[in-house]
Image: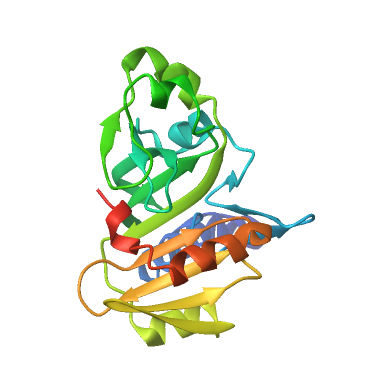
Amino acid sequence: MILRNIIVFLALAIPFFGLSYWLTAPPSSPVHENLPWEVEVLPGGGSRVFGVTLGETPLKNLSDRLRARPRLEWVGSPEGGRRLEAIFEGVTLGPFLVDLVARLDAPETSSWAAGNGVPSGGDRRLPLPQGEVDAAMALPVAELIYAPRARYSEDTVGRRFGDPESRLPARDGRYFLYPEQGLALYLAREGRDVLHYVPPRAFGALEQRLRDGDDPERVLP
């Protein structure tokens, strides 16, 4: 009889105390992925960020991950060439709302650009014809430009990204340079902060463009 009473008591008490703990215990911290300071450096000078292996992952894979379709535009770049960009506005990455620009590995001599009169140089933008979109979605993402809707502080940059290898003055702010991760983080005095990701092996070329005055906010939607 005593054993039976103990079993009945435990059968009633365990669910009760379990429910009480679930209701009163502090909530567990959410685990987020796709954080901007999580850059995976790969052998051979490559990198992966937001699930994208730069120079390899097709634009369609990024579009599927974001569950969003980009706006595709040819842009005359200030260094005298042309580039194809995919613009995602107001997408969620991890816990953050951001704008994201993917620069694609597309030959600037492509008939897409030449046939639509995209000049080299300048800031002219022209939409990609609808008939070329499927082909563009198969192109690899070469660079990513990430613009959070929230502002960063220098303290946040130091805590999340660590000490930069160097700092570079810019027109309306300054860059924090992380060549080993392939990241140039632009902290604006006013306006938008911008994070520019390239494979680490390509960071020297990016840094030179920044030193030549490439405007980080010019690429944003």
Relative to 186, say whether 81 is above or below: above
* Residue shown at 35% from the left, 76% from the top: 187
The residue furthest left is 190
Relative to 52, say whether 16 is above or below: below
The residue furthest top is 131
State the residue in front, 150 or 141: 141
* Residue shown at 33% from the left, 82% from the top: 153
* Residue shown at 42% from the left, 54% from the top: 145
Expressed as whole percent of the image width and height from the top left, the position of residue 106 reads 52, 33
**In which quadrant of the rendered view does residue 127 lie?**
top left
Q: How many marks?
A: 0
Expressed as whole percent of the image width and height from the top left, the position of residue 195 reads 42, 64
Q: How is the image coloured?
A: rainbow
**In which quadrant of the rendered view does residue 42 lie?**
bottom right
Residue 188 relative to residue 208: left or right: left
* Residue shown at 43% from the left, 68% from the top: 212
State the residue in front, 37 or 75: 75
Expressed as whole percent of the image width and height from the top left, the position of residue 68 reads 35, 33
State the residue in front, 94 or 84: 84
Expressed as whole percent of the image width and height from the top left, the position of residue 25 reads 42, 71
Is residue 183 something that shows in the picture? yes
Q: Which quarter of the rendering shows the N terminus?
A: bottom right
Is residue 6 something that shows in the picture? no
Residue 208 relative to residue 86: left or right: right
State the residue in front, 75 or 142: 75
Residue 5 relative to residue 171: left or right: right
**In which quadrant of the rendered view does residue 6 lie?**
bottom right
